[in-house]
Amino acid sequence: MRLGVNIDHVATIRNARGGTHPDPVRAARQAAESGADGITAHLREDRRHITDEDIDRLMAEIELPLNLEMAATEEMLEIALRHKPHAVCLVPEKREERTTEGGLDVAAGHNHIAPFVSRLSDAGCRVSLFIEADPVQIAVAEAMGAAVVELHTGAYSEAALRGDDEAVAGHMELLRAGAREAHRRGLEVHAGHGLTYDTVKPVAAIPELAELNIGHFLIGEAIFRGLREAVTTMRGLIAEARA
């Protein structure tokens, strides 16, 4: 199983004060040295963390594949087509949200989203859709021609944080069923959002999953133990779950 490390919140800390420190590209290098298989960065419309210059540098200086998260807007499409990262993950985005609040509704937004999938795929990017583990959303993602779906693990993670075992079990069953359905349809299956050391193993144990994308927790943990150790520990927990 691959581990993609999201470096957005290194940039969040930098932007709180301005200047160049801490450098998200340096964080990407450390993640690579610690066993990350890819780097994820979300270029938001309001540039609240990652900036255009960060994307320029990540493409130029990092050897690992870049997974560019973005909203389905013409501005973001132009940036993605200019850089042609290894992967583009289309995500929902609202300016007032603190973090992504749920999956992209590709069923309701089919007519708007489908041309983005087509143009990015034609440019050579692997297109991923960040969706809920819902069979309708998965079917529409396949019909659109996406190569990958990333299942939203936020509700599972929040239930685990609350200690709501019944809700955790329900969300895990949805994730398992969604992963099976997506895999059956020939889609590569990823997952992410809100995962921690305490919650990653049940998700990583889902056999159909090929990749997890984890960011906020790792950057927060790095404050206490350093980014290299934080990534290495997560990498180990994932390996245990797969075994």
Image (cartoon, rainbow, N blue to C red):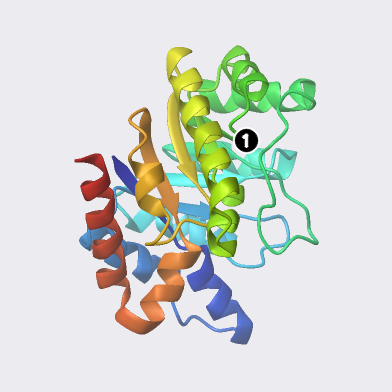
As drawn, 103 above or below 149: below
Q: Nearer the viewer, residue 169 or 66?
A: 169
Quarter of the rendering containing residue 132:
top right
Q: Position of residue 173 (x, y in %)?
A: 51, 33
Residue extending furthest toward the front = 166
Residue extending furthest toward the bottom = 17
Question: Could you tell me which secondary element the residue under label 1 belongs to?
Answer: loop
Q: Nearer the viewer, residue 28 or 175?
A: 175
Quadrant location of the N terminus in the rendered image? top left
As drawn, 191 above or below 112: below
For the point 72% across and 49% down, the residue is 93
How many marks the image carries: the answer is 1
Residue indicated by mark 1: 132
Q: Residues within 10 Å of mark 1 (few under 14, many from 20)?
A: many
Residue extending furthest toward the left = 243
For the point 24% across and 63% down, the residue is 232
Q: Nearer the viewer, residue 15 or 188?
A: 188
Q: Is 124 on the left-hand or right-hand side of 50?
A: left
Quarter of the rendering containing residue 226:
bottom left
Q: Position of residue 158 (x, y in %)?
A: 59, 57
Q: Position of residue 182 (x, y in %)?
A: 49, 21
Q: Position of residue 136 (x, y in %)?
A: 67, 19
Q: Is 81 on the left-hand or right-hand side of 226?
A: right
For the point 46% across and 66% down, the residue is 217
Q: Is 47 on the left-hand or right-hand side of 9?
A: right
Is residue 4 among what the camera can see?
Answer: no
Quadrant location of the C terminus in the rendered image? top left
Q: Nearer the viewer, residue 150 or 58?
A: 150
For the point 74% across and 23% down, the residue is 107
